[in-house]
Image (tube, helix red, strand yellow):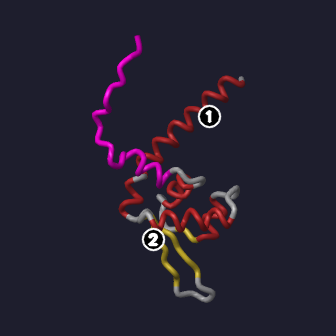
């Protein structure tokens, strides 16, 4: 006898997890939020913070985060002009999530070191 499929009791129009993951799901996005949580950073500083990311991908992720209202982009009145990125209030709300991921990452790293020993 087949099991009866149960109805999901959570509202379905737009799952909050899907909405959140649509922002966090991009490659390098959590890293960007992590580094910007310490304060404003220029593009070149973010390239140093995350050396494995290409300039093209970094630019794409920054534009996506700006379009989602997670970061602000400010052109500095310097010669040559430089651009500074900063988390918005919404962006700062991701901080506990990213900190939790970092915490688990530290524990996973420690577990792997212990297993290797």
Query: Relative to 98, is 65 above or below?
Result: below
Badge 1: how crowded within 10 Å, few (<14), some, or many (20+)? Answer: few
- Report the magenta residues as a range: 1-24
User: What percent of the width, then of the height, locates residue 31?
Assistant: 56, 53
**How many marks do you count on the picture?**
2
User: What percent of the width, then of the height, locates residue 51?
Assistant: 69, 58
Left or right of 11? Residue 26 is right
In the rendered image, which residue does mark 1 sit on? 109
Q: Quadrant of the C terminus?
A: top right
Is residue 11 in the magenta section? yes
Between 69 and 35, the residue placed more toward the observer is 69
Q: CA distance from mark 2 to mark 1?
A: 33 Å
**Residue found 52% across the figure and 50% down from its top:** 25
**Which secondary structure dominates the residues rendered in magenta?**
loop
The local secondary structure at tag 2 comes to: strand
Between 55 and 68, the residue placed more toward the observer is 68
Between 67 and 37, the residue placed more toward the observer is 67
Left or right of 31? Residue 89 is left
In the rendered image, which residue does mark 2 sit on? 72
Between 20 and 78, the residue placed more toward the observer is 20
User: What percent of the width, then of the height, locates residue 39?
Assistant: 48, 64
Is residue 85 in the magenta section? no
Badge 2: how crowded within 10 Å, few (<14), some, or many (20+)? Answer: some
The local secondary structure at tag 1 comes to: helix
């Amino acid at each position: 006898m087949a099991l009866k499929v149960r109805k999901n009791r959570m509202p379905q129009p737009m799952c909050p997890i899907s909405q959140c993951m649509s922002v966090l799901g991009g490659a390098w996005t959590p890293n960007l939020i992590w580094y910007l949580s310490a304060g404003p950073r220029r593009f070149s500083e973010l390239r140093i913070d995350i050396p494995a990311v290409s300039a093209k991908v970094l630019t794409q992720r920054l534009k996506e985060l700006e379009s989602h209202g997670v970061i602000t982009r400010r052109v500095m009145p310097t010669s040559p002009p430089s651009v500074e990125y900063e988390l918005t209030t919404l962006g700062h709300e991701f901080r506990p999530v990213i900190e939790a991921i970092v915490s688990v990452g530290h524990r996973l790293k420690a577990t792997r070191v212990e297993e290797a020993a």
